[in-house]
Image (cartoon, rainbow, N blue to C red):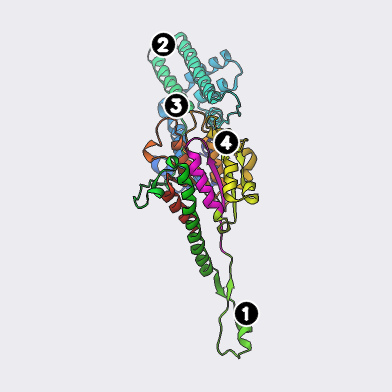
Amino acid sequence: MLKILTGFAACCRAFDLRVSTSEVLDAARHLELVDPLDPREFKLAVRANFAKSRRDQSRFDFLFDLFFHGIRTDKDEALTPEIGKITQALRQSLSDDPMEQALVDFLDNEPLAFIDQIHALHTKEERPQKIFKSNMGQLSSKLGVMLQINAIKSKIMALLDQEAHGDLGDALKDHFTERMNRAFALATEEPREHNDALKEKSQAATGENLLKDKPFANLTALEVIEMRAVIEGLVRKLKDQVGRRFAVKNRGVIDIKKTLRNSGKFQGVPLNIAFKNKPPRKSSIVALCDVSGSVWSGARFMLTLLYSLQECFARVKSFVFVADMAEVTELFQDLDINDAIDQALGDDTINRNAPTDYGSSFQQFKHDHMNDLNQKTTLIILGDGRSNYLNPQATILGEMRERCRRIIWLNPEKINTWTTGDSEIASYKTHCHEVRTCMNLNHLTEFIEELVL
């Protein structure tokens, strides 16, 4: 049993599930307390030790079904000697290509190498491309694996036609066909993490104020100027609310020493109670703003609010991107807010006419700015998630989630358009804590109030 558990643990590690040696030993001890022949009890005992959170359970369930039911079945035990002969003959006819050898191991009930290769393929990062952008790198790799699977399947069927006939030949053909189909499914699909705690918020227009309800993309130049005045009033209101909130929260526990020292001059009458002051807990903000097309107007107002209220946060860092990413934090330290925004959105380092590429931008952030994220950081992403059918590289967003406190995605589109066309929100929201509509100033104001207050 311990050998089987260690083999399964190795497959879990290859699939990015953290399983330690002590957890394997704990699972083995727990299996002594239940009936290991009961499928439900066996799975629960192993999952309790191997799956750390609800998000890990989808990967665990996928691997468990593959390892214990997909490649290890009772009907295959009688065919084991014949299967070994076929796989041995197949090894001699193949090259030393790692993927082909991993496929043969998969057919021979050793899935680790194939799982490792496939997971590396799914999480592969595309190299940055400056001239001609496409996601053909990963797609061509997957296509190559599919062709290898079909080629090996054809070789197996040819071997079976030569060496196995009758019922045995049919049974072997069914076995290898099912096994190759599982390999094909593993190469083309990868389970997504559960994200039951995701908050999706779709907001409708209130109809109270036409300017505040008007989508950012539809604002005229005059309305943008009017919106600045509205935002200034909003900022003053929020600063007052935050000041009162922090003033109340600033009072901590009773300071005994200070109370006795102050009361000593009056012999304790009256007794003036002194409290220890505690600094307000402020979170850090990292904002990634898509400034392409109609999204840039929303980025303008969000950055205005964030930097107008920056004393409410421990730190605010901001980045803008289309296909490449650039940090604009220093502009807000040296210039007036409106001038800094105009310069940030008009920066020559960002080609706003380039096709939007979220995957490339996330990759650049990972390599250059990942250390800006910590467990006190709230990562805010403003964008429509439309990546022009390029590789979304959503696994990078998963790595960012592990580093920061929470990820909030603000989408300037209606929720019924999030799954249409080239939108990758379905891939990205798996790694977000909250996804919400942010089309106008009312939506943005509500979000900022929740963030600050």
Q: Amino acid at mark 3?
A: Ala
Q: Nearer the viewer, residue 352 or 31?
A: 352
Mark pair 4, 2: CA separation:
56 Å
| Mark 1, residue position | 258
Furthest-front residue in this view: 222
Mark 1 residue crowding within 10 angstroms, few (<14) / some (14–19) / many (20+): some
Mark pair 4, 3: CA separation:
30 Å
Q: Are marks 3 and 1 in contact (CB under 8 Å)?
A: no
Mark 3 residue crowding within 10 angstroms, few (<14) / some (14–19) / many (20+): few
Question: Which is more foreground, mark 1 or mark 2?
Answer: 1
| Callout 2: SS | loop
Q: Amino acid at mark 1?
A: Lys
| Mark 4, residue position | 361
Q: Earlier in the sequence, mark 3 or mark 1?
A: 3
Mark pair 1, 2: CA separation:
94 Å
Mark pair 1, 4: CA separation:
53 Å
Question: Which is more foreground, mark 3 or mark 2?
Answer: 3
Q: Earlier in the sequence, mark 1 or mark 4?
A: 1
Q: In this rendering, is residue 405 above or below 84?
A: below
Q: In this rendering, is residue 256 above or below 172?
A: below
Residue 219 image-quadrant placement: top left
Q: Are marks 4 and 2 in contact (CB under 8 Å)?
A: no
| Mark 3, residue position | 185
Q: Amino acid at mark 4?
A: Ser
Mark pair 3, 2: CA separation:
28 Å
Q: Which residues are magenta?
A: 280-307
| Callout 3: SS | helix
Q: Is residue 275 magenta?
A: no
User: Is residue 28 visible in the rendered structure shown here?
Assistant: no
Question: Which is more foreground, mark 4 or mark 3?
Answer: 4
| Mark 2, residue position | 165
Q: Earlier in the sequence, mark 1 or mark 2?
A: 2
